[in-house]
């Protein structure tokens, strides 16, 4: 042990349960209170199951600096071979039986070097601002149509259902070549993949599901996705276009096309990572603006404030709530001795609400500077779609600010029960057309 290392800190059982309980994530303030208390006491702390074998123990990392350090050290903290997202052992066993891998989907987030940089390079350029610029006109037209439709529904709307849900979904489906008529199916599959623990989003209607039930929902969604994208890839090999679906379908790595499972994983990660995340940060931005009419009026009058609103909304909502890593070697972190092979949860919600990095972190502060949040992660796996997410949000809010004079809450908003991707699932608003 090195100098500053103390006896192993273990989270008490009742608090540990909150960290892994999807329902705890539906209560935002309570969740932030929990992370604040944990961070202040033991910023790196062991979470152990109170039922033996339920899940492998892991280190919960809640301080900004520690999450940043782990994210940037991709040789020291690996995504493979353990699930990149918190999983119960039953789920991992199910996945191994179904696919031979610990993960149901092999996608970018699952690979480490040397494969990861090769796969990442295939689409990196496509997602850079220079290439995305050619999508702007289409995005503007889509944003205008979305806002028109919302205003056509009357003065009260559920912003998630009508705007922040469908808009990013269409964008991502368009770049993947999915026709509009297939979108509802894609939406449901994504929600099952990310919100398998939520009774509404999973479509199960069940409040409490066993890990096995959750994983069966998720596995069914993965299989349907795989079959669907195999057809898209075949089409793009025959008729390539300039969309990202064509880039993936025709990609060569070391002179070979992607193996079918990796190709399906590539489509699935873009399809899924790309919309519920952006939807959650878009809904969060709108919630913040609806609660603060003066701020809404200010940004209507001065559009230069918009990028600050977008960035702060992404920090404030942190839609991707965690990822997992496995330590490649022994090290010291936050006063704890981490062993090679230990599992760690890097918690973006907690890191993005660390008062040492973000003064008054629960306040929505569009002028926050610096705002070097971790909502997109950092290091080799930093979000591939971050420029697209920002662009989409900016263009949508330009359309909203043009067409909506004022907005206010029209009831209680509700959040998804999910430990992984989370955010508002309803946001009732009263809107006044301009
Ligand atoms: C506000 C919206 C979004 C948020 C908060 C978000 C967040 C994240 C986070 C936290 C990661 C993991 C970073 C890490 O491990 O260091 C990630 C990875 C990724 N995101 Fe996003 N994302 C968003 C939107 C998008 C969009 C629009 C797309 C694509 C259309 C996308 C595609 C991806 C992909 C492919 C990865 C895997 C990258 C890799 O492992 O190399 N994301 N995202």
Image: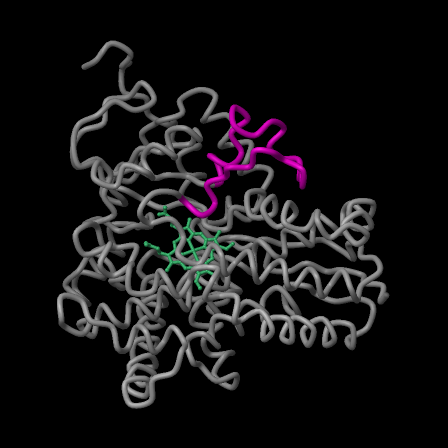
Task: Give the left or right position of residue 22, taking residue 45 as reference.
Answer: right
Q: Which residues are magenta?
A: 349-377
> Between residues 241 and 319, which one lies in front from this camera angle?
241
> Is 366 covered by the magenta stretch?
yes
Q: Where on the picture, by quarter, is residue 193?
A: bottom left
Quadrant position of ligand 1: bottom left
Q: Residue at x 69, y 54 (%)?
A: 286
Q: Main secondary structure of the magenta part?
A: loop
The quadrant of the image that shows the N terminus is top left
Judge whether 110 appears above or below 322 on screen: below
Outermost residue to the front: 130
Judge whether 257 appears above or below 377 on screen: below
> Between residues 130 and 376, which one lies in front from this camera angle?
130
Judge whether 243 appears above or below 239 on screen: above
Judge whether 417 appears above or below 39 on screen: below
Task: Give the left or right position of residue 270, taking residue 183 as reference.
Answer: left
Q: Residue at x 65, y 51 (%)?
A: 285
């Amino acid at each position: 042990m090195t100098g500053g290392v103390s006896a192993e800190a273990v989270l008490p059982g009742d608090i540990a349960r909150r960290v892994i309980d999807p329902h705890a994530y539906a209560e935002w303030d309570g969740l932030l209170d929990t992370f604040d208390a944990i961070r202040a006491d033991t910023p790196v702390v062991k979470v152990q199951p109170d039922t033996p074998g339920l899940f492998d123990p892991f280190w919960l990392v809640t301080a900004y600096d520690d999450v940043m350090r782990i994210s940037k050290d991709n040789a020291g903290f690996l995504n493979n071979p353990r699930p990149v997202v918190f999983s119960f052992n039953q789920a991992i066993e199910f996945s191994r039986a179904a696919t031979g891998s610990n993960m149901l989907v092999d996608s970018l987030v699952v690979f480490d070097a040397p494969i990861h940089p090769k796969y990442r390079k295939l689409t990196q350029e496509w997602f850079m601002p220079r290439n995305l610029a050619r999508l702007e006109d289409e995005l503007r037209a889509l944003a205008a149509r979305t806002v028109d439709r919302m205003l056509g529904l009357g003065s009260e709307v559920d912003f998630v259902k009508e705007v922040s849900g469908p808009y990013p979904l269409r964008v991502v489906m368009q770049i993947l070549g999915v026709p509009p008529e297939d979108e509802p199916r894609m939406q449901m599959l994504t929600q099952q993949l990310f919100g398998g623990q939520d009774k509404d989003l999973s479509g199960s209607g069940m409040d409490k599901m066993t890990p096995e039930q959750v994983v069966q929902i998720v596995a069914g969604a993965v299989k349907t996705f795989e079959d669907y994208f195999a057809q898209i890839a075949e089409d793009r090999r025959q008729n390539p276009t300039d969309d990202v679906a064509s880039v993936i379908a025709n990609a060569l790595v070391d002179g070979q096309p992607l193996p079918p499972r990796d190709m399906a994983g590539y489509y699935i990660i873009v399809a899924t990572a790309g919309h519920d995340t952006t939807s959650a940060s878009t809904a969060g931005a709108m919630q913040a603006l609806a609660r603060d009419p003066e701020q809404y009026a200010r940004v209507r009058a001065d559009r230069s404030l918009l990028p600050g609103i977008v960035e702060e909304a992404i920090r404030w909502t942190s839609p991707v709530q965690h990822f997992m890593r496995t330590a490649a070697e022994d090290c010291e972190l936050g006063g704890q001795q981490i062993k090679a092979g230990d599992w760690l949860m890097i918690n973006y919600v907690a890191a993005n609400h660390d008062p040492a990095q973000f003064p008054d972190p629960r306040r929505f502060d569009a002028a926050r500077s610096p705002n070097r949040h971790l909502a997109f992660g950092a290091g080799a796996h930093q979000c591939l779609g971050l420029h697209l997410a920002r662009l989409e949000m900016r263009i949508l809010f330009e359309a909203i600010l043009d067409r909506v004079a004022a907005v206010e809450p029209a009831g209680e908003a509700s959040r998804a029960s999910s430990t992984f991707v989370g955010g508002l699932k309803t946001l009732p608003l009263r809107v006044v057309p301009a």
